[in-house]
Amino acid sequence: MNKRYKNLPALVMLVLCLFSFASSMAEPVQQQKPLKIYDDWGGDFSLSDHNGFPLNLSDFAGKVVLLNFGYTHCPDICPSTMFNMKRVVKKLGNDADKLQVLFITLDPERDHADRLRTYVEYFNPGFIALTGSVDEITKVAKKYGTKFKKEEFDDEGNYSIAHNAIIYLIDQQGRIRTFFRINASAQDLVGGVRQLLAE
């Protein structure tokens, strides 16, 4: 046998072992920790949907809910968040029907039912917008730790609303399980939804 190939089997085994070791180091097995339950925040509420019908959070028992607060005159953050929700639904594929996206307006004086309906259905016909009196919405926002206020009135009475930018991941029992930042990626949101679906 040629001396150059005498140790070939041993070298091949060594290379295979090193490759196997490197692969195991590159792809560690990750076990997801159970998501925390935030009992001090959130909970059931009653508002009206964009068709004028009363709706409770508990009506979605058995589904995962992604909830965020905003207003339709918002120039950037709110629409970009809704576009992200649209991407989440697409990424979920066949599991999309196990998720409900809810958008609660912080501007009921301008966000009437017709405007809300047009707004959310532009992103996805299955999304639901919720409204109520200023007092009702303030109470729900407080339960969820969302603060908001009108600001920057101009001569024509136009204004913007400053508010917390949070997406709430709510489980099938109506409990908050994660607070996502408004700039969370669709992939991160999908990961949270799928984790709850797997529980």
Image (tube, grey):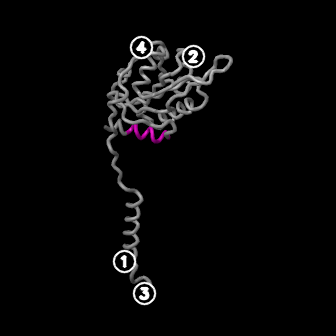
- Determine which residue is flagged by label 2: 110
Mark pair 4, 1: CA separation? 74 Å
Q: Measuring 62% from the left and 24% from the top, which residue is drawn there?
A: 152
Alpha carbon separation for disc pair 3 and 1:
13 Å
Q: Is residue 11 above or below residue 153?
A: below
Name the one closer to the observer, 100 or 133: 133
Q: Is residue 58 left or right of residue 154?
A: left
From mark 2 to mark 3, how far is it between C-alphas? 86 Å
Q: Amino acid at mark 2?
A: Arg
Q: Residue 10, which numbered label? A: 1
Residue 162 as seen in the image, left or right of residue 37: right
The residue depicted at 44 percent of the width and 13 percent of the height is: 53
Disc number at residue 3?
Answer: 3
Query: Label 1, label 2: how many angstroms apart (C-alpha)?
Result: 76 Å
148, above or below 198, in the image: above
- Closer to the chain start, of discs 2 and 4, is 4
Q: Nearer the viewer, mark 3 or mark 1?
A: 1
Label 4 or label 1, whichever comes before in sequence order: 1
* Residue span colored magenta: 185-194
Mark 4 vs mark 3: in front: 4
N-term-proximal mark, 1 vs 2: 1
Which label's residue is closer to the chain start, 2 or 3?
3
Q: Amino acid at mark 4?
A: Pro
C-alpha distance separating marks 2 and 4: 19 Å
72 vs 165: above or below: above
Q: Are marks 1 and 2 in contact (CB under 8 Å)?
A: no
User: From the viewer's perspective, is the residue at label 4 or at label 1 nearer?
Assistant: 4
For image coordinates 39% across by 69% down, the residue present is: 18
Q: Is residue 82 left or right of residue 39?
A: right
What secondary structure is the stretch in magenta mostly built from?
helix
